[in-house]
Amino acid sequence: MQFKSSAYNFFYSSDDGGVLYNGRTGAALCADQATSAAISALLSTPQYVVDEDSNLWRVREILRDKNVLIEESLDEIDEILVKRISRQRLAGGLNLTIAPTLACNFRCIYCYEDHPLGVMDTATAQALLAFVAQRLPQGTGLHVTWFGGEPLLAVDRIEQLTEGLIGLCDERGCSYETFMITNGYRLNGTMAKRLLGLHIGDFQITIDGEREVHDRQRPLAGGQGTFDVLMRNLADIAPHVSSVTVRINLLRSNVDSAALLVRRLQEMQADVPALAISLGQVDKATDL
């Protein structure tokens, strides 16, 4: 069987090792220096002939299992489109991304937002509920992604909107699902319990490496670090969440630190089984 390298592979290497991420499957691997060299060789030459007893053969099998190396005949774009269409047909209903505020307590170095102060006003909230009432089909489902800014700066508005959205779903026999993208600074155990009462139990937060690197890339608006609070919150929320995905944004400057963080998070997964890891690429247009 012939193999090729997936078009969705992102491989970042340094003198100490490397991090491999596949954007189609979400597979993530941290590698030491020797394994990193093997990965680099196999990605550039997938048909490399290797001895079955060698380390290169072992690495190749891992890459095949993770769909980093894929069958030559596989059309990845076609597969993505088929899965997307299938999900849309099964889901039906209405999918919304709601930003209850554009304000944020972080000042991330790569952020594109201006963060004006203020929370969604009552008139906008009412207009949003009217929009849902007009567009939500009977007997389907409503999926809401809470976004920002930082959505946890506007929990009261989220609470008010949730009451209205669930009421509309109940009237129409619709399911209600949510997801929240938050910087995680206010997501402690107490907040997680409050959000669980609002049917919000799935989260994504971002941590960009170990303390020094993360605090440089994702400080508070006043310049203070945020790493220690986020790591403490991850442990605190474990009993109250369905899932929490830690996204790590990769830049040229944080590959080594990101690899260390992945190892730390993998060790945490025994105590926080809801924890998942996702690697993301910051577009090179940011020149970071």
Image (cartoon, rainbow, N blue to C red):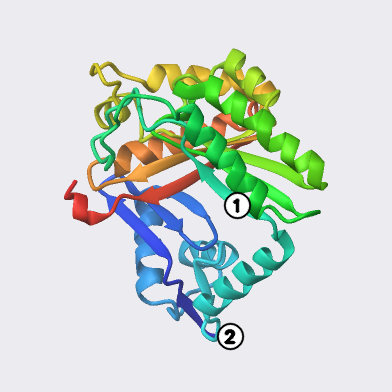
Q: Earlier in the sequence, mark 1 or mark 2?
A: 2
Q: Secondary structure at mark 1?
A: strand
Picture quarter with the N terminus: bottom right
Left or right of residue 270, residue 138 in this image: right
In the rendered view, tell whether residue 140 sits above or below residue 268.
Answer: below
Q: Residue furthest top?
A: 190
Left or right of residue 86, residue 276 in this image: left
Residue 101: which quarter of the image? Answer: top left
Give amino acid for label 1: Asn
Q: Position of residue 164 (x, y in %)?
A: 67, 33
Camera sees residue 162: yes
Q: Position of residue 7 (x, y in %)?
A: 42, 72
Q: Mark 1 or mark 2, which is nearer to you?
A: 1
Task: Name the one closer to the observer, 197 or 232.
Answer: 197
Q: Secondary structure at mark 2?
A: loop
Task: Name the one closer to the observer, 66 or 35.
Answer: 66
Camera sees residue 273: no
Residue drawn at point x = 51 percent, y = 84 percent: 72
Neighbor class of circle 1 (other Cα within 10 Å; few <14, some 14-19, many 20+) is some
Residue drawn at point x = 34 percent, y = 60 percent: 37
- Distance between the Cα atoms at labels 1 and 2? 41 Å
Neighbor class of circle 2 (other Cα within 10 Å; few <14, some 14-19, many 20+) is few
Give amino acid for label 2: Met
Residue 159: which quarter of the image? Answer: top right
Q: Position of residue 117 (x, y in %)?
A: 32, 24
Q: Which residue lies under the disc numbered 2? A: 1
Residue drawn at point x = 64 percent, y = 40 percent: 178
Task: Name the one closer to the observer, 20 or 23.
Answer: 23
Q: Which residue lies under the disc numbered 1? A: 95
